[in-house]
Amino acid sequence: MCCGLRKFGQILQVAFTYVGTIVGAGFASGQEILQFFTRYGWPAAFSIALAAFLFIWLGTKLMLLARDTGAGSHEELNRYLLGPRFGRVFSLFQLAVLLGTSTVMIAGAGSLFQEQLGFHYQTGLLLTLFLGYGVLRKGMSGIVRVNTIVVPFMLLYVVLVFLGTQRLSTAGNWLVLPNEYPLLKTALAPLLYAAFNLATAQAVLVPLGAAFPDRKVLARGGVLGGLLVGLMLLAGHIALAARMPEIRQYEIPMAQLISQFGPLVQLIYTLVIFGEIFTTFVAGVFGLTLQLQQHLRLREPLLLLVLLAVCYAGAQFGFSSLLSLLYPLFGALSLGWIGLLMRRGSIPI
């Protein structure tokens, strides 16, 4: 009985860490769901089902491959999948994306504290860096612990938004919204979404696979995590579709959906966004640390401080124009990467 509960707890830890790594600030704001799914109308439900299947299958396979090959970082796994030369090139590009993403997360946290909580921008940056350093010093156990706390609140927030939508006369819009985009673009959207998120999630999923020696725990945690991501995407899509096309004009569409619940729930929503920003941030810096430790002779505490300082400096300017170029390119390259991932390994449940 005790052993069964312990194993179930480990499965939840894997699942929640997986969800927290995939689901970030873009999801919490609603922009990711809107851009990759809702704007494509009624076919988006099928797109979400496809994305969920890829998250279940390939996310689980990624963790099992990391466990079976003994990969210490995503760069080692890339060399296994792509070969020494292309694996190194892809990892270098991935490093740039992780650094850019981490920098933008810090900037996002500063803006959130300034706009929603009334703090100074720099206060938000420094508090996030301080908390991040504390979590990152604990390594993978710190990443798992923070996701185990944050992800249940993410799930609660999605459930609230979904339930609030069911009272509207337009709740069934997701079944009838027209699609004005070409079939190829509609079909590629879930593939790009899954490919980009899985490729960047390597930063945490690879060491997570190494941290849990039980294959069944990893497999079942991966299946549960991928399923939860799919359900969260569907719930968010249904809520956004109910307010189409007006909802497309807002920078943070989800904020408009949550406003119906009053100031207390809005405060909780703000904290949930911060939690999602924070989990994405620590995941990125954690992956960068593991990768750079293989090439630089710096002790981990010093390397962490250097990376956090670089993110802090970058957050003073913002990297949105750089990322607007990097993200689509990285998504396209990641399609080839997941193609190779599909051909490797097996998933014993």
Image: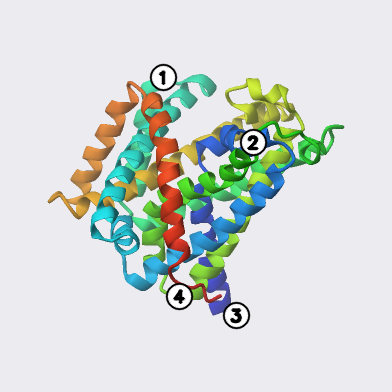
As measured in the structure, the alpha-carbon distance from the residue carrying label 4 to the one carrying label 2 is: 44 Å
Q: Amino acid at mark 3?
A: Met
The image quarter containing residue 227 is bottom right
Mark closest to the chain's N terminus, 4 or 2: 2
Q: How many marks?
A: 4
Q: Amino acid at mark 2?
A: Pro
Q: Amino acid at mark 1?
A: His
Is there any visible trace of residue 218 in the rendered image? yes
How crowded pointer 2 is (Cα within 10 Å; few <14, some 14-19, many 20+) is rated as: few
Residue beneath disc 4 = 214
| Label 4: element kind | loop
Judging depth in this view, the residue of 88 and 186 nearest the camera is: 186
Mark closest to the chain's N terminus, 1 or 3: 3
Discs 1/4, front: 4
Residue beneath disc 3 = 1
71 versus 281 height, above or below? below
Looking at the image, what colour scheme do you see? rainbow
Q: Which residue is at 48% across, 63% downward? A: 342
201 versus 36 height, above or below? below
Marks 1/3 in contact by CB < 8 Å: the verdict is no
Marks 4/2 in contact by CB < 8 Å: the verdict is no
7 versus 223 height, above or below? below
Residue beneath disc 2 = 182
As measured in the structure, the alpha-carbon distance from the residue carrying label 1 to the one carrying label 2 is: 45 Å
Is there any visible trace of residue 13 in the rendered image? no
Residue beneath disc 1 = 120
